Image (cartoon, grey):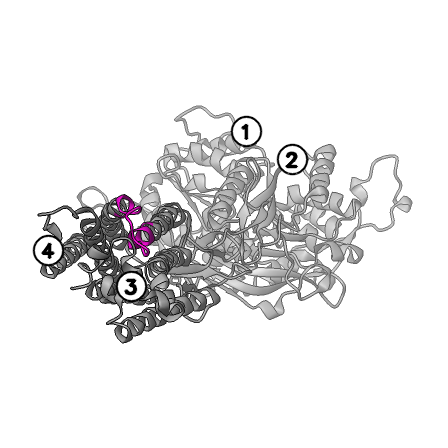
Amino acid sequence: MCNERFNIRNYRWMQGMIYAIKEINDNSTLLPDVTLGYAIYDTCYNSPTAIEDVFALISGHRKFTPNYQCQLNSTLAAVVGASTSAISIAMATVLGIYRYPQVSYFSSIPNLSDKERFPSFFRTMPSDIFQSKVLVKLIKHFGWKWVGVLADNVDYGIQAAEMFKIQMERMGACVAFNEGIPIDGSRKRYSEIVEVIRKSTAKIIVAFSCDANIVPLLEEVVRQNITDRTWVATEGWSTSGPLSAIKKEYAKYWTGTIGLTLPLCKLEGFQEFLYEKNPVTTRDDTFISELWEDIFGCKWAYKLPSNVSQADVKKLCTGLEDLRKADHAYTDVSNFRIACNVINAVYAIAYALQDLQSCRNGKGPFENGTCANIRSFESWQLLHYMKNVRFVDRSGMERYFDKNGDFLAVYDIINWQVSSNGKISYVTVGKYDARVEPGHELTLIEQDLVWTGGTRQVPRSMCREDCRPGTRKNVEEGESICCFDCIPCANGEVSNGTECFACPEDYWSNKQKDTCFLKEVEFLSFDEPLGIVLTIFSILGIIISTAILAIFIKFMNTPIVRANNYELSFLLLFSLTLCFLASLAFLGRPTVKFCILRQIGFGIGFSLCLSCILVKTIVVVLAFTMTKPNQNALKRFRPMYHRVIVASITVIQICICIGFLLSSPITVQKDPTVAVGKIILECSQGAEQTLFAILIYIGVLAILCFILAFLARKLPNNFNEAKFISFSLLIFFVVWLSFIPAYFSSKGRYIVAVEVFAILASSFGLLTCIFFPKCYIILLRPELNTKREMMGRAPAVAGNVHKP
């Protein structure tokens, strides 16, 4: 007899085995002419004791000598047990050597599926691999991210907790703490564990344990009055007898517990079989007296110490008490779950024996088609049939062992609720069935669930609340991934509360950083203030150029117009008008056509303008420097040559433009980097290259014109045009030299604005300096518009320059 306290649950399992054997023996068709017997050994939850018992079973004697049998005709067919994984491992190590089939009804540690280590081990209990999967699925379903773990400090608990932690991390959830439950009953350690629970923010606690270890811990939870936790129970204690007998006033601590348990099976007659147990009629049962004391709260007179009289005992056991009237977990049909595993284990062995018995010589599975003899078979022969056995259990479910010796997992999901009598009851609220197609294994009836405090609201358990959309999780080094800070996403990024993602190329994030919207397309348009101002000045330049052209046409025969070679003047006015028109092409939505028109119009306009100025300057220089006899260079510099020079210079610029456009085709490109949340539409890099090629050519022309005009600035004349040309070109240089740094320091539409401003400023500079003085004389000082005044001190020369 062990020193452990009496365990009613284990006793009921033992009765399940006895009941199954009795039922099989009463069945004349299952194993005809064969009677099954049994020997029951108490392992006392102790591995050395269990190994000693196994040796006794194999050898027939307590003092074991290897490979020696006291009983020559051994009747041992198979072993049912043990309940705990640690004891099963110890037993399976020995039984595997001799190939004796061993069927456990409650051991779930995954290691036992290793057929190399445990070749003759089977179990009707699902492996913990399935249990961890189901628990993780439950936690995922209810959205719990921060979970505490308790596990028995043995192989079963350690491995189960480790598997659970790995699967939790894969799911993105975290283990808040992982504490080992002592198996030595250490009160100090229980107190330490409960203190960890109290300090933790985790509201969900998963416990991999058995009732013998978890009950003292839960008693400490009650003592420290921790009521705001939801417990998740493994099948080892989810329907524990000691817990179901919890006092009514303590029910509040466990209401809402959710757990896994094996499904109930139909055990007709088993409850009646349990009722038949009685200390008077069942004298061969050494545990019946302890069962009686536990159920009825009485004491046997013969067990009282010598110093205690019967009068001191509140209630003495008589053996006449009626089990049917006892409200106890022992006979509660809702607890017949592990008992079903025990009965299935016995029936698996019985059906394997039936297959062995029904073998026909010549068709057997062994050498030369031989069969085993049911009266004297070897353990390895029955092991062969155990691997292939199939039978239908009492629930109508086909049962068989897989290649690892395991039953496929089927679990009931139960919820601890307070019944009408104030005690804890187990309500089935779901099911897990590994046999169905993936994704549909778990089913829940959520409306039937009751949580901590009796509420219907699913509890929350998180180290940190989820980040709102627009922010992302940031985990500090060394912290759990579930304990994070929420950091806003950068501009142009959005998030779902976990990670930030960049918006597509043409999109931008809103202020809350939770939605991408189409970026605003930006360009220098006509209807914005800056565009309006530039448009007004462009149109004003066109109007002024046209007005001056009209004035020159009207006063074409006056000396000042004739003296300035009106053909070149008209062409110069036309080119300036073209420059003003070209500036309008820079405004509005860019297109490929307008991008090309900008550069060609700008290049041709200024080339034509400067070619006219160059010819004008040459004419002035020749007119005032070739005044000696026989110097007829001016006469030879006929108007036809003027046109050739102007046309040649302009054609060269056209060729430059076409060459660059062909080598670097212009396109419209989007630049999302200039302005936040905006797309800048601009002409491509080819346009920029063309622009600077044009500017270099124009710059060379301007320098040449300026040199000639500068040389002729002091020539004698009342109206010295070379002086005005020099000043206009000086303005031209200042504008375009300022343009270069301004262009490279500007972004987006302001680049276009700088370019338009440079065109307008240089065009107005040329228009003002070259034509305004002439218009002033024509319109306001007509008395100066005479041949005499135009000739001044060089009357003989001035007259040579008016003819085209």
Q: Nearer the viewer, mark 2 or mark 4?
A: 4
Residue under circle 2?
A: 182
State the separation of the CA atoms marked 3 and 2. 98 Å
State the separation of the CA atoms marked 1 and 3. 111 Å
Number of numbered discs: 4
Check whether the beta carbons of the residues at disc 2 and disc 4 lie within 8 A of each other. Answer: no
Does 723 appear in magenta? Answer: yes
Q: Earlier in the sequence, mark 2 or mark 4?
A: 2
Residue 555 in which image quadrant: bottom left
Provide the secondary structure element on which disc 1 rests: helix
Does 784 appear in magenta? Answer: no
Q: Which residues are magenta?
A: 709-726
Q: Nearer the viewer, mark 4 or mark 1?
A: 4
Task: Say if residue 76 shows up in the picture.
Answer: no
State the separation of the CA atoms marked 4 and 1. 133 Å
Q: Earlier in the sequence, mark 3 or mark 2?
A: 2
Q: Earlier in the sequence, mark 2 or mark 1?
A: 1
Residue 354 spot, x, y in % from top left: 35, 54
Task: Say if residue 175 shows up in the picture.
Answer: yes
- For residue 23, the mark is none
- For residue 576, the mark is 3
- For this rendering, which residue is in front, 235 or 478? 478
Residue 753 in which image quadrant: bottom left
